[in-house]
Amino acid sequence: MRLTPSHFSIYFLLQLYEICCCVSPTEPVSNVTLTSSSTELVEFSSSVSLSCSSSGSSLSFLWLNSSSEVTGSDRVQISDGGSNITIINVTRYDQGPFECRVSNPVSLVTSAQLTLTIYYGPENTILTISPPKEHHQEGSDISLSCSADSRPPAQFTWFLNGSALSDGPELQLMNVQISQSGSYSCQAFNNKTVRYEMTPPEFISVLEKVSGASVTSPSNRPIEGNSFRLICDAAGSVFTREWRKGGLDLTLTVNMTLTNNNRELSFSSLNKDDTGDYSCIISNPFSSEEAKYSMIVNYGPETVQITGPIQIHVGGTFNLICSAESVPTAKYIWMPNTGAIVYSAVFYKNNTELSDSGNYYCEARNDITGRKSSAVHELTVTYEPEPVPPGCSAGCIAGIVIAVLVVLILIGAIVWYFFHNKKKQQPSSNTIRSNNKAEPQSDIKELEEAVYENTSAIYDN
């Protein structure tokens, strides 16, 4: 049989009839419902199953979390042709909102949103102190606050040195006292997760003003060669101690040490150079005070000396003076050779006798150091020589002797001249008397004047 175009048209119509009459039509999507096994979950410990139900045929399912497609993973399991998902160990990011989108070739319907409540925390618990200072002055106000990431909001409890104080997100310390110094911490608690978190401790330092600064010594009097201690103390919060001497920072010498946070200045063996004005400055960040101590090192006696004459004449007067280096001033005792003890720095004697010659001992004593030292002085007493004319030198004395000799020679010459003339002339007795009265006297006068002139020349020289 030959097929004609009409045959093909009949065949096509028959096929179309079979399709329309023998295959069921696709039912549109409707009644899309999203349900959850639980809506309140605890992070990291709860799991949840979400189910999507729908009417219609040839259905396809697509899950959305905040408009992002949900796909299978280690924590997310998709089952029942995609109509169910199970989330294991939920996190806060699994809260949604979730949607289920159902489709078939003829329709597409999205479910209503479903949001899960996921409890988490507390975590990132933070303690804040205001004002944020390292130290706080006694009497000031301090505010402490505590915060944490938590759902529901955490409950807070405050602790001081491990002991509970009060509850609440804030702690106010008004007119704070030094007794409130210590380690503060805050504990956050979530009654849904039943979890706790404690902040690291924060130390609050409350300082009292420095007062009543003093430098004292528990030692006896400062004596050269002995040990000695100075102690610097004050009421209040002592942070630092600085020692000074003579207004300048103290430079420690080989005999000095500072101990107990500079509280104690010790001298292993005092010397006289340690004498001076010491001060100690006690301070904290809010106040300071200075205390002073004047130290005089007692020493001696040493370098005992006696000053005075070493020779004196009988009947004279002399002073011997004894001195020594000593603090306090030494007391002096004289022990002369006579045995009569004198308590004075000066030994005095008049109407000196030969028996006063000898050694004079002076002993210096220091009642504070308990030490003594002595010196000796030798004195010689002699007779006084014949007095020499004042202002006449040895040359003067020699001139006088020569003048006397010249006078004697002239007198001898005059006598010789007189007797020689007498023998030569033999006048009468009256003439002789007359001549004896006139001429010899004139000659004698001339000789005497010559003698006087020579003597004066000698004295002038």
Image (cartoon, grey):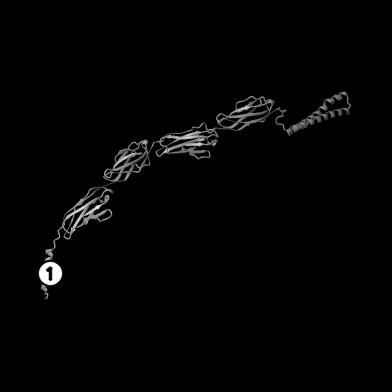
Number of numbered markers: 1
Up-down relation of residue 222 to residue 19 (above or below): above
Residue under label 1: 12
On-image quarter of the C terminus: top right
Q: Residue 377: image x %, image y %?
A: 65, 30
User: Residue 396 or 418: which is nearer the viewer?
Assistant: 396
User: Residue 362 or 159: which is nearer the viewer?
Assistant: 159
Q: Which of the 4 image quarters holds residue 320?
A: top right
Q: Residue 104: image x %, image y %?
A: 18, 59
User: Residue 204 or 251: which is nearer the viewer?
Assistant: 204
Q: Residue 10: image x %, image y %?
A: 10, 70
Residue found at the very far right of the displayed protein: 426
Q: Is residue 66 visible?
A: no
Up-down relation of residue 6 to residue 206 (above or below): below
Q: Which of the 4 image quarters holds residue 73?
A: bottom left
Element marked by disc 1 = helix
On-image quarter of the N terminus: bottom left
Residue found at the very far top of the displayed protein: 430
User: In percent of the image, x 11 and y 74: which residue is there?
Assistant: 5
Q: Is residue 432 visible?
A: yes
Q: Is residue 20 left or right of residue 377?
A: left
- Classify mark 1: residues with Cα within 10 Å, few (<14), some (14-19) or many (20+): few
User: Residue 263 or 80: which is nearer the viewer?
Assistant: 80
Say what amino acid the circle numbered 1 marks.
Phe
Q: Residue 234: image x %, image y %?
A: 43, 34
Residue found at the very far front of the displayed protein: 1
Q: Is residue 139 left or right of residue 457?
A: left
